[in-house]
Image: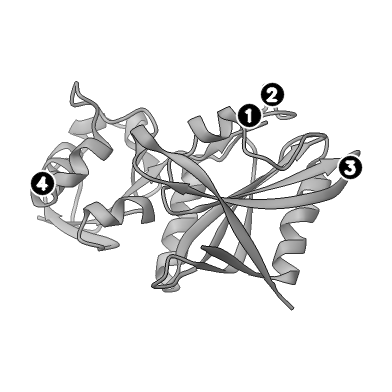
Amino acid sequence: MALKIPAALLDQLRRHGEQTYPYECCGALVGDFDNAGGKAVKAVVPCGNTRTDSPQNRYHIDPSELVRIQREAMLAGRDIVGFYHSHPDHPAQWSVTDLAEAHWTGCSYVITSVDKGRAALTNSFQLQDQEEAKHFENEVIEVDN
Amino acid sequence: MPIKLLIPTPLRPYAGSQSIIQVNAHTIGEALGNLVAQHPDLRRHLFSEDSNLRSFVNVYVNDEDIRYLSKDATPVKETDTIAIVPSVAGGR
C-alpha cells in the first residue's frame, strides 16, 4: 500500500497545520484508487474544524462539506481517497480517538505533527477492515516531485 | 420514482463496487430500504441492530441533513440526489 502525493500537495497540507496551530487542521484528499489498493492524491481540500469546543486536540469535518467534496470529486471522475489532520505538539501517530472516529475503510488518514508551530513529521495510515474489527496500518507516502 | 444515491468509497465493496445506485422511492426511508434490499450486505454498515441509522452515518438530500428534515419520512423527488457520508473526526 502506498499513498502517492505530489510534493506541492504534501506541502499544502503540512502548511495548513502550521496555519491553524495551536489548533488541529483537517481536510480531505481527492484522487484515484489503483487496482492494487494504492492511492494517488490529485487535490488537497482544506476543511474547517467544527470542534470549536476543543480544537487543540480534536477535529471534526462538517458532513455538509464532505457531501460537497464527494459530489465534486465524483463529477470530476475522482474519489475521496483519504483525509488529513494535524497533531499540535504531539506525535504524528494515530490516537485511540482517531481510530474510534475513523469510518472510511480503505482510505488514508494522514497525520502531521506540528511542533511549536512548525510542521514536523507526516505519516499516513490506511483504515482496514470492517467497523467491528477496524484498525490502522502504516502506509508509505510516495512523494512525486 | 427513480432517485440517485451516491455511495461513498468505504461502502462500495458492499454495493457491487458502484458509486451511484438508482432506486425507486418517494421518501428517504423507502430509498434506503430499497438500497439495502438490492444490496443486503450494506444493511449492517448503514443500520444498527435497532434498525436506526448508525450514529456515524450521515444522509443528505442534496445539501440538507435528513436529521434536520423529516428523517426517514423526508420526501424525495426525481431531481434529488441522496448522499451517504460517514463522519470524519478524531484528534490526538
Amino acid type of the residue that numbered disc 4 sits on in the rendered structure:
Asn
**For the residues bearing labels 2 and 1, Cβ distance under 8 angstroms:** yes
Amino acid type of the residue that numbered disc 1 sits on in the rendered structure:
Arg
Indicate left or right for A71 with B54 as reference: right
- Mark 2 or mark 3: whose residue is earlier in sequence: 2
What is the crowding at mark 1: few (fewer than 14 residues within 10 Å), some, or many (at least 20)? some
Q: CA distance from mark 4 to mark 2?
A: 39 Å
Per the image, label 4 sits on a secondary structure element best described as helix
Q: Circle 4 sits on which residue?
A: B34
Indicate left or right for A103 with B52 as reference: right
Residue at 51 percent of width and 63 percent of height: A1
Q: Circle 1 sits on which residue?
A: A51
Nearer to the camera, B16 or A3: A3
Residue at 74 percent of width and 78 percent of height: A145
Nearer to the camera, A145 or B37: A145
Q: Which mark is residue A117?
A: 3
Q: Position of residue A139 (x, y in %)?
A: 58, 56
Same subunit: marks 3 and 4: no
Q: CA distance from mark 2 to mark 1?
A: 6 Å
Q: Circle 2 sits on which residue?
A: A54
